[in-house]
Image (cartoon, rainbow, N blue to C red):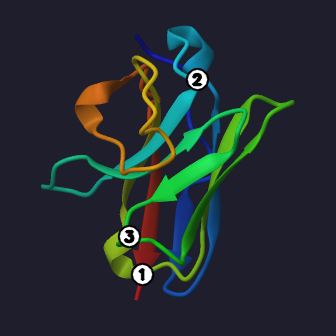
Amino acid sequence: QAQPAESGGGSVQAGGSLRLACPDSSYTSGSNCMGWFRQAPGKEREGVGSIYTGFSRTYVADSVKGRFTISEDYDKKTIYLQMNSLKPEDTAMYYCAARLVFSPSCGASVPRVSEFGYWGQGTQVTVSS
């Protein structure tokens, strides 16, 4: 089931920043959990991080820890992925999705693709060296 698209992708040089935005669709499943994912060419989709919406509890993968931050604007029902110090290996299509059912692991672990649905269309992030 398609959801409104992510936004904010683009092309930047290494060391640059981008902020991605995504409508919070977790009300659809009632999970209050949104995840960010990415998929590089020829690779499997991987979890970047998750947020327990309404409580702003977040978790990001070790590969982006210290560079990427997840946040939300509760009133706007929008979640964000702030990406700083971007590296060429961050180049990928980035997706957001809502967890299908509530889990206390939301915002405390890397999200698993199989546990999420209501995927956005993705937004391309390209980082050049």
Tell me which amino acid carries mark 2: Pro
Tell me which amino acid carries mark 3: Asp
**Residue sitting at x 36%, y 51%:** 110
| Pointer 3 with pointer 1, Cβ within 8 A | yes
**Residue sitting at x 24%, y 46%:** 45
**Residue sitting at x 50%, y 55%:** 59
Q: Position of residue 118 (x, y in %)?
A: 43, 19
Q: Which mark is residue 90?
A: 3
Q: Which mark is residue 4?
A: 2
- In this image, 31 relative to 54: left or right? left
> Which quarter of the figure has residue 9?
bottom right
**Residue sitting at x 15%, y 55%:** 43
> Which quarter of the figure has residue 112?
top left
| Residue 44 to residue 29: above or below | below
Number of residues whose C-alpha sits closer than 10 Å to that of mark 2, classed few (under 14), some (14–19) or many (20 or more)? some
Of residues 5 and 29, which is closer to you in this image?
29
- In this image, 21 relative to 37: left or right? right
- In this image, 73 relative to 114: left or right? right
| Residue 16 to residue 104: above or below | below
Label 3, label 1: how far apart the Cα atoms are: 5 Å
Number of residues whose C-alpha sits closer than 10 Å to that of mark 3, classed few (under 14), some (14–19) or many (20 or more)? many
Disc 1: which residue = 87
| Pointer 2 with pointer 1, Cβ within 8 A | no
Question: What element does badge 1 sit on?
Answer: loop
The N terminus appears in which quarter of the rendering?
Answer: top left
Tell me which amino acid carries mark 1: Lys
